[in-house]
Image (spheres, helix red, strand yellow):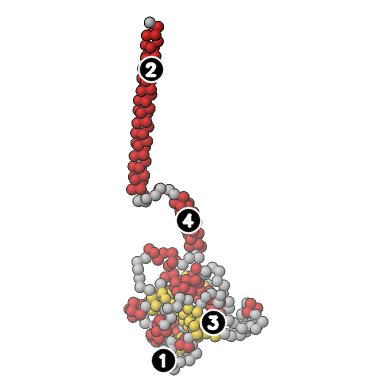
Amino acid sequence: MHSRAANNRLSNSAFESRVAVLMLAMFATMATVYVASRLWQDAESRTYLVKELNRRTGQNQSAVSVDDTLKIISCREQRKRLSALEMDLAAARKEGFVSRYLSENVTKPFKKRHLAVVGIITTFGRKQNRDAIRKAWMPTGVALRKLEDEKGIVVRFVIGRSANRGDILDRDIDSENRQTNDFIILDGQVEAPKELPKKIKSFFVHAVDNWDSEFYTKVNDDVYVNIDALGAALSTHLDKPRVYIGCMKSGEVFSESTNKWYEPDWWKFGDGKWYFRHASSDIYSISRALAQFISINRSILRTFAHDDISAGSWFIGLDVNHINEWKFCCASWTSGPGAVCAAV
């Protein structure tokens, strides 16, 4: 009896052990299936998210890599700098350091660039000279506009305002201009002999602000110009970006105050007392880049006693091609072909 009872107990114990092992195996299997299922779902979700992100960004890589982060930072810095530059440009434009043409040309309709803007420097009491020029070489009325449209050459008389603003001198010029419509009247410039160098600077500023041209030419009102020859001469230099064309010369610097050509700043020209090379005052031309330089730097470009010296000084330190053109020597009408001018 005892032996049978012992056998029954052993049999029950073994059965219970097998059941326990089986249950543990079932739980382990279920746990494995559950974990594998979750991992598979997570993997599918990650794959979907990566594909969707790539689809939206159009890239086969992470949306924000280290390189992308650096690029974003760089763009933000450039944006800050651009904003600062725009503020500086606005301030410079307000102070008159930027050419009005340069700052506004993006809003203007396209126009063909002129070949030259010619400013004839005149003054009060010189109407006879102006009339002689109108009869000799400067067209009037419709013919003046035709010269601009067909040959790209703009010609105007250039004059300032009387020190006694609105007096008979100003009124006479206004009346003449109403009849001829061929003046540049520099309202902010006083018309006086000592103001001539500043007047020349004001002319270039006004011209480059109002006309887009390859060249800007200054002429005295006692010079006769062959317009066709001028246009031909200038056209040969269109391939040069910075040119200063004229009858180049030098000369003595006079330090005696009683001399007609007295130079108050004579000491700046050294012990030799000779001016640097510059174009004769009768007629000279500068390219667009140089006229823009004058316009932008008008506030800091100084003048000397004479207008031709002043103009030459503005270019002496720049990378400028000084062209000594005999066709611009007007002392006497040159017999060679293509002569541009003659002084009278």
Instruction: Examine the rendering and report whether any part of residue 60 can be seen.
Output: yes
Give the alpha-carbon distance from disc 2 to disc 1, as whole Å: 131 Å
Residues at marks 2 and 1 touching, judged by CB atoms closer than 8 Å: no
At a point 40% along the width and 48% down the height, the residue shown is 62
> Disc 1 marks which amino acid?
Pro
The foreground one among 58 and 146 is 58
Q: Secondary structure at mark 2?
A: helix
Question: According to the image, label 2 marks what residue?
Answer: 14
Tell which tag, 2 or 1, sits nearer the viewer. Answer: 2
Q: Secondary structure at mark 4?
A: helix
The foreground one among 212 and 207 is 212
Task: Kindly identify which numbered label has been placed on residue 78.
Answer: 4
Task: Kindly identify which numbered label has been placed on residue 337.
Answer: 1
Q: Earlier in the sequence, mark 3 or mark 4?
A: 4
Residues at marks 2 and 3 touching, judged by CB atoms closer than 8 Å: no
Question: According to the image, label 3 marks what residue?
Answer: 278
At a point 55% along the width and 77% down the height, the residue shown is 316
Q: Is residue 138 left or right of residue 161?
A: left
Give the alpha-carbon distance from disc 3 to disc 4, as whole Å: 43 Å
Q: Earlier in the sequence, mark 4 or mark 2?
A: 2
At a point 43% along the width and 93% down the height, the residue shown is 336
Q: Earlier in the sequence, mark 2 or mark 1?
A: 2
Q: Quadrant of residue 104?
A: bottom left
Q: Earlier in the sequence, mark 2 or mark 3?
A: 2
Q: Is residue 326 left or right of residue 43?
A: right
> Disc 3 marks which amino acid?
His
The foreground one among 41 and 162 is 41
